[in-house]
């Protein structure tokens, strides 16, 4: 029996930190652009390489917080695919359910970091997903897969069949392509959710509510079926609603390096706390601490907090409070 099985795409993130660029407003006065000289050789200050994707980030986060964790996704039949599995197993994330795509290589992304922000070049393959026999688990975390097409519809049906046939708690953090499927297509999952995680902009997109009123957004998200709706909003913190009470949690403000993986780390902290029987208020604090320390490092894995560190943080920082709104 596992505590958590995560499902989602697997990739490698290659981070390049640069300083030889500028941020400018060009063409669109409300949009910042990263500007580099065409044809130039750009010096790189630092290089980092990590297994990446919403599912791996969440799986490692949960494992560090003490959950027995496994993951399903696909990699290529190449050294990069082997490397991902090996790195995840070092983090005590069971990799025997990862499947190998014999025709296409492992996904890759290159992330340019400049002045605490990042621009991402994404190279992802279309996969012919096939869900392997998964173990019994107390939690299933479903997140980003794609792109749109029959292969995504097929794996969703397979996952839904697994959810229906097992007594488990479903957590859902839909990715870009899943959000594009729309509310009706996702309802079979949202109606079975124990908790659903989205950021504010994603909530607006999925619910069709063009408002900044967080209570309206939380109500609209809860109407899709989850028992608990969680909406993150960057520097404004996070919010939750269980059908009875609205909750708000500020940020734990430590120096940020860049923001890759903040949402994944929040969800892993929230799920771990809930798994241990802690209330929503404490789950939001776990998520907030986890996200803060990820923001303080490059990538979505380096800063993830271990269980004993989390327990110390929650004890030593009572000033991080969750209020009812």
Image: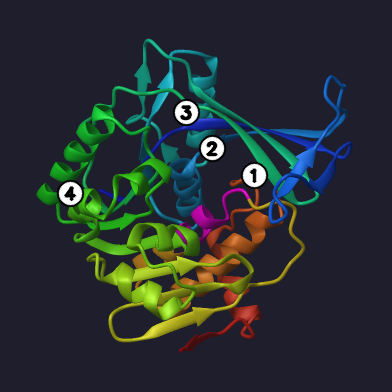
Q: Which of label 1 and label 3 is nearer to you?
A: 1
Label 4 environment density (alpha carbons within 10 Å; few <14, some 14–19, many ≥20): some
Residue range corresponding to the magenta coloring:
260-269
Q: Which mark is residue 52?
A: 2
Label 2 environment density (alpha carbons within 10 Å; few <14, some 14–19, many ≥20): many
Q: Residue furthest left?
A: 165
Please provide percent x and percent y for residue 230: 41, 68
On screen, 179 above or below 50? Answer: below
Q: Name the residue beneath numbered marker 4.
A: 163
- The answer to whether residue 315 is left or right of residue 41 is left
Q: Main secondary structure of the magenta part?
A: helix
On screen, 81 above or below 163? Answer: above
Q: Residue at x 56, y 84 (%)?
A: 321
State which tag comes first along the sequence, 4 or 2. Answer: 2
State which tag comes first along the sequence, 3 or 2. Answer: 2
Secondary-structure class at tag 4: helix
Q: Which mark is residue 85?
A: 3
- The answer to whether residue 44 is left or right of residue 120 is right
Q: Name the residue beneath numbered marker 1.
A: 299
């Amino acid at each position: 029996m596992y505590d958590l099985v995560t499902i989602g795409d697997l990739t490698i993130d290659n981070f390049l930190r640069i300083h030889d660029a500028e941020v400018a407003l060009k063409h669109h006065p409300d949009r910042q652009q990263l500007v580099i000289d065409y044809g130039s050789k750009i010096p790189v200050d630092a290089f980092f390489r990590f297994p990446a994707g919403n599912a791996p980030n969440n799986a490692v986060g949960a494992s560090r917080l003490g959950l027995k964790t496994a993951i399903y996704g696909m990699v290529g039949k190449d050294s990069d695919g082997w490397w991902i599995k090996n790195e995840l197993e070092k983090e005590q994330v069971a990799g025997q359910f990862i499947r190998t795509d014999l025709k296409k290589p492992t996904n890759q992304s290159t992330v340019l970091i400049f002045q605490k922000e990042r621009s991402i070049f994404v190279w992802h393959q279309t996969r012919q997903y096939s869900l392997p026999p998964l173990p019994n688990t107390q939690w299933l975390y479903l997140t980003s897969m794609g792109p749109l097409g029959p292969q995504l519809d097929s794996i969703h049906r397979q996952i839904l069949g697994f959810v229906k046939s097992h007594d488990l708690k479903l957590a859902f953090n839909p990715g870009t392509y899943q959000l594009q499927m729309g509310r009706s297509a996702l309802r079979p999952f949202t109606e079975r959710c124990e908790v659903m995680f989205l950021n504010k902009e994603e909530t607006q997109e999925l619910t069709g509510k063009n408002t900044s009123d967080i209570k309206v957004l939380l109500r609209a998200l809860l109407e899709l079926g989850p028992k608990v709706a969680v909406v993150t909003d960057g520097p404004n913190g996070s919010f939750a609603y269980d059908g009875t009470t609205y909750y708000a949690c500020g940020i734990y403000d430590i120096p940020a390096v860049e923001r890759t993986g903040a949402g994944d780390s929040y969800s892993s902290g929230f799920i771990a706390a809930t798994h241990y029987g802690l209330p929503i208020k404490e789950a939001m604090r776990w998520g907030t601490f986890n996200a803060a320390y990820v923001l303080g490092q490059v990538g979505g894995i380096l800063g993830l907090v271990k269980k004993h560190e989390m327990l110390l943080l929650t004890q030593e920082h009572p000033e991080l409070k969750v209020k009812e709104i």
